[in-house]
Image (spheres, rainbow, N blue to C red):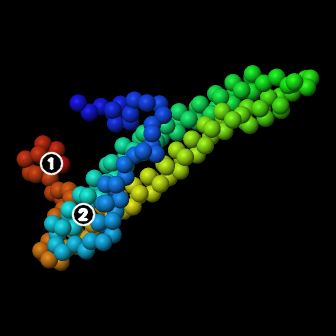
Amino acid sequence: MVTLGSMIGTNSEEEFVNFDLKEIQDVLQELANTKPIDIAHAELLQQKSLRGADILTEYLGKIIKTIGYLESKVSSTKNRVSLEYNSTEGKTTADMKKWAGECSPEVEELQIKLAKAKASKLVVEKKYDLLIRGHHYWKDLTTGMRKSILGYSIPTTDSQPEQGDPIVKNWG
């Protein structure tokens, strides 16, 4: 059984830097270098684009979950460090506490992880967009081939409902 939980992962912080993008790169390379010779070949490229986009969708879910977790952790760590800070030189001001929270090595480390997660999300989103655009390109190309080679186009929806349909009978 495949659950949504298994797709987005069970860890709060996923190892997104270790996601294997070899299949995605192979698909993108093939799409860039391939000229379809017939309708079936163009449809195959269309399906490969969708397969790549599907893989990236799972990765995006894990990255977005990780970003949310890291943002929350940065905020709570800043607050904790700020509350724990006490000046050794007399009175501790609110600005000193705020500065201590923002400059903490612990917070800095979390912010670097968060920046890497956001950068990874951007890269994966751009590759996803390329694959979806590629899918639509191959789909349009396939439709054009059908029209020019076969002389017809397969409609995506029925233009006329069946006469036996109870809704059609009530149109009067």
Residue 49 or residue 114, whichever sits in front: 114
Point 20% across, 62% down: residue: 44
Label 1 residue SS: helix
Point 58% across, 31% down: residue: 72
Three-letter amino acid code at disc 2? Leu
Q: Quadrant of the N terminus?
A: top left
Residue 81 screen position, x and y as percent:
71, 26
Three-letter amino acid code at disc 1? Val
Q: Which residue is mark 2?
A: 45
How busy is the neighbourhood of tag 2: few (under 14 within 10 Å), some, or many (20 plus)?
many
How busy is the neighbourhood of tag 1: few (under 14 within 10 Å), some, or many (20 plus)?
few
Residue 2 or residue 10, whichever sits in front: 10
Question: Furthest residue to the left?
Answer: 164
Total marks placed: 2
Point 56% across, 35% down: residue: 70
Residue 93 screen position, x and y as percent:
86, 27
Residue 38 screen position, x and y as percent:
16, 72
Question: Furthest residue to the right?
Answer: 90
Would you place residue 43 above or below residue 70 in this image?
A: below
The answer to whether the residues at label 2 and label 1 have Cβ atoms under 8 Å apart is: no
Q: Which residue is mark 1?
A: 168
Would you place residue 116 above or below residue 105 in this image?
A: below
Q: Is residue 81 visible?
A: yes
**Rendering quarter of residue 48:** bottom left
Residue 22 or residue 91, whichever sits in front: 22
